[in-house]
Amino acid sequence: MKNLKNALLLKQLYRLKQLGYSYTSVVPFQEEEPDLTLPNTLEKLQKQALECHLCLLSKSRTHVVFGEGDLNADLMFIGEAPGATEDRLGKPFVGRSGELLTKMIENVLHVKREEVYITNIVKCRPTDNREPSPTEAHTCQPYLLKQIELISPKIIIALGATAYHYLTGDETNISKVRGTIHKQNGYTLIPTYHPSYLLRNPSAKKDVFEDLKMIKELM
Ligand code: SF4
């Protein structure tokens, strides 16, 4: 919540800068204390995210990609950030890596894609497909944490190093932690490679296949 508060303060300062201020006191102007609590339904949370301008990614995005799937899913997949196709369509994992993720879910886990929930660490696309900055990831984090709280999945699959890092705080290389089981905050977290990594490194598909087989057993 501190991140959200800092982001709102930053937004106020940007607004003042646009008005021509070059200096202001720590509290730029008095206005009613903003309501920092996030909504308790996914529908309202999504509505709030769709209007979000808390970080600079809002300036270059076409659509906010909030997430999609079963709101009561036991399985949740969390990637890094929307790509170009996702940004254009406003849906997560719909490009080439999305097609591969769908195959992973349906052909190996034998559940329909609509039966899981899919989202990302940040909801807006970083240009040039760069990794989201720590500021962007931390600013967007309250949305993700609330999604996890409301959906309450049993298993979260962190797709790639960035998702694993921001979900656990651990910076260990993904090749060393993939397929490991982490119990935290009432769910089981399992990291594996991101589908876009698999498109570049097809030989790693067998590792992900092993990770998914283990997840299938846990299910
Ligand atoms: S990435 Fe997250 S915090 Fe940044 S503008 Fe988009 S929804 Fe808001």
Image (cartoon, helix red, strand yellow):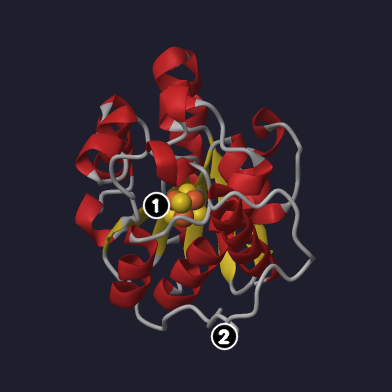
Residue behind mark 2? 32
- How far from the left and from the top, in percent, is residue 133? 63, 38
Badge 2 amino acid: Glu
Badge 1 amino acid: Thr
Quadrant containing the N terminus is bottom right
In what element is the residue under mark 2? loop
- How far from the left and from the top, in percent, is residue 31? 58, 81
Residue 162 in the image: above or below residue 112:
above
75 vs 150, nearest the viewer: 150
Taking the image as shown, residue 65 lies to the left or right of residue 36, namely left
Give the residue at x 64% y 50%.
Answer: 166
Give the residue at x 36% y 32%.
Answer: 83
Residue 150 in the image: above or below residue 14:
below
Give the residue at x 38% y 62%.
Answer: 49
95 vs 88, nearest the viewer: 88
Residue behind mark 1? 119
In what element is the residue under mark 1? strand
Q: Nearer the viewer, mark 2 or mark 1?
A: 2
